[in-house]
């Protein structure tokens, strides 16, 4: 059996970086994580139907009943975003290079470095923690969190007392984040040859009105005292047919909406329709999207008396994606990552902040704040109601960039703090039951 250690965790992280693992392609990485858990002496290791990895370190080596302390779940995720152009990287994205005091490469801090630390921390706490430790690394986090949604499903899923998400916090304690919903606005027209535009109805003519409505929507976003303001922006325009000598009969405008925890898909879509409706009506009447003169746009469908039909045959819907796991399971999934927010005064949060402290060593508790990006904590806390915090080394500004790196001095400090953090939140969760 291999002994858990910080140096061993970093060597493990290097191995993980060298295995590309886009969503749906995590199989080889999963097998490497399983091998590490087994070598570290985990009491149980398995994969679920979707290919997520679960390992358990039991408090007494017996049945998974939580022992005298609460059950804590440590979680990172197996998938990564694409590396982009390798030539734009200072160090090759899949070499796991250590240089200038940092571990470099795709996944170094989002999230294979923290995944490796969590995996070794759980093994290092075997026989020392008062309760069971579940280490769950799910698939498809980068595309809406299907893996975590499945792992914590109401019937037959994992139900720990507290979750610690290993997304980078630069040593702070994270207590929530805005969610993300991808929304599509589809304009319909009539296709035709570009040489005879009078025989067609160009769906692109509706785009200025749609974008004007999106700007109105962006200016009327709700706000939270801790999480800040929601935000929405158009991030893509796709025309079909894509041939440049054909007038398109369908154009899709895609919105990236960073949402607050109380937002629902139905309320979001209703707000989009409310914002773009007046601009589409003006465009159909012959005015420009902001009320000035412009070319009229004929509608391809009559507007109904309900709220879901819009002028010009425009539809609004939540984006979905056909996702297929590396184990072969397929499902149409909403591109939705829920938000969540823990009470800063929650006993789990305050215990975590005291246990972690600050790198300056002043004895002050760690800073408590939200993340700027979405995590699987939206599923564990926002949807399932499980107390969830985040802690890991690494700076958020390097996530999803070609400068991704993990400072090794900070990572060593984070590893040591995890050894105090896990027992602290176990005790707080048990007392607050």
Image (spheres, grey):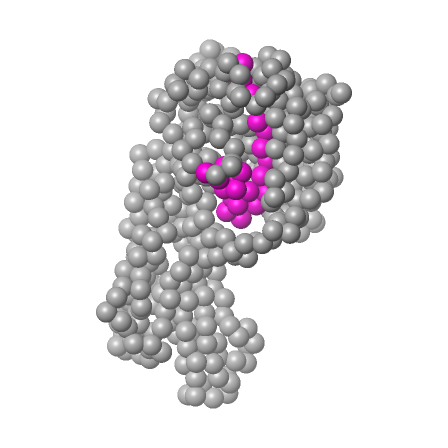
Question: Residue placed at 61% from the left, 40% from the top?
Answer: 48
Give 124 or 416, whichever is nearer the viewer: 124
Height in image: 122 above or below 308? above
Question: Residue placed at 30% from the left, 45% from the top?
Answer: 222
Give 278 or 118, whichever is nearer the viewer: 118
Quadrant hosting residue 4: top right
Residue 176 appears in the figure: no
The x and y percentages for residue 267 are 31, 52
Q: Report the side of 433 relative to 329 (left or right).
A: left
Quadrant hosting residue 137: top right
The residue lying furthest to the right in this view is: 1
Question: Residue placed at 74% from the left, 25% from the top?
Answer: 39
Give 70 or 8, whichever is nearer the viewer: 70
The x and y percentages for residue 244 are 55, 77
Height in image: 93 above or below 294? above
Residue 206 appears in the figure: yes
The x and y percentages for residue 175 are 42, 30
Q: Quadrant of the N terminus?
A: top right
Height in image: 39 above or below 293? above
Question: Residue placed at 34% from the left, 33% from the top?
Answer: 226
Span highlighted in magenta in the image: 130-154
Q: Quadrant of the C terminus?
A: top left
Q: Report the side of 111 relative to 320 (left or right).
A: right
> Does 150 appear in magenta?
yes
> Does 283 appear in magenta?
no
The x and y percentages for residue 181 are 43, 50
Q: Report the side of 45 relative to 241 (left or right).
A: right
């Amino acid at each position: 059996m291999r002994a858990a250690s910080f140096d061993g965790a970093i060597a493990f992280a290097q191995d993980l970086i060298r295995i590309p693992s886009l969503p749906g392609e995590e199989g080889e990485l999963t097998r490497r994580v399983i091998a590490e858990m087994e070598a570290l002496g985990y009491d149980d290791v398995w994969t679920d139907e979707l290919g997520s990895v679960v390992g358990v370190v039991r408090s007494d080596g017996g049945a998974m009943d939580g022992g005298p302390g609460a059950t804590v779940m440590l979680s990172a995720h197996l998938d990564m975003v694409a590396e982009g152009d390798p030539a734009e990287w200072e160090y090759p994205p899949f070499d796991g290079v250590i240089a200038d005091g940092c571990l470099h490469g795709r996944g170094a801090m989002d999230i294979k470095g923290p995944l490796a630390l969590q995996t070794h921390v759980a093994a290092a706490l075997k026989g020392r923690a008062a309760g069971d430790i579940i280490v769950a690394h799910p698939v498809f986090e980068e595309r809406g969190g299907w893996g975590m949604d499945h792992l914590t499903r109401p019937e037959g899923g994992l139900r720990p007392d507290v979750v610690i998400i290993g997304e980078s916090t630069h040593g702070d304690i994270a207590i929530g984040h805005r969610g993300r919903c991808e929304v599509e606005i589809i304009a319909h027209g009539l296709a035709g040859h570009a040489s005879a535009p009078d025989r067609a109805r160009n769906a692109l003519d509706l785009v200025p009105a749609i974008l004007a409505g999106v700007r109105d929507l962006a200016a009327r976003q709700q706000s939270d005292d801790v999480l800040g303001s929601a935000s929405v922006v158009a991030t893509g325009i796709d025309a079909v047919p894509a041939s440049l000598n054909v007038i398109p009969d369908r154009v899709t405008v895609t919105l990236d909406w960073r949402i607050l925890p109380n937002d629902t898909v139905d309320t979001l879509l209703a707000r989009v329709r409310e914002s773009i409706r007046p601009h589409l009506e003006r465009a159909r009447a012959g005015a420009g999207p902001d009320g000035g003169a412009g070319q009229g746009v004929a509608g391809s469908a009559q507007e109904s008396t309900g709220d879901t039909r819009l002028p010009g045959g425009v539809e609004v819907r939540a984006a979905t994606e056909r996702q297929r796991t590396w184990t072969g399971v397929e499902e149409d999934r909403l591109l939705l990552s829920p938000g969540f927010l823990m009470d800063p005064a929650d006993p789990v949060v305050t215990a975590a902040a005291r246990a972690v402290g600050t790198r300056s060593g002043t004895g002050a508790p760690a800073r408590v704040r939200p993340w700027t990006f979405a995590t699987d904590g939206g599923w564990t806390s926002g949807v399932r109601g499980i107390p969830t915090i985040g802690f890991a080394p690494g700076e958020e500004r390097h996530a999803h960039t070609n400068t991704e790196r993990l400072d090794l001095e900070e990572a060593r400090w984070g590893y040591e703090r995890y050894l105090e953090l896990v027992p602290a939140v176990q005790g707080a969760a048990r007392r607050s039951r």
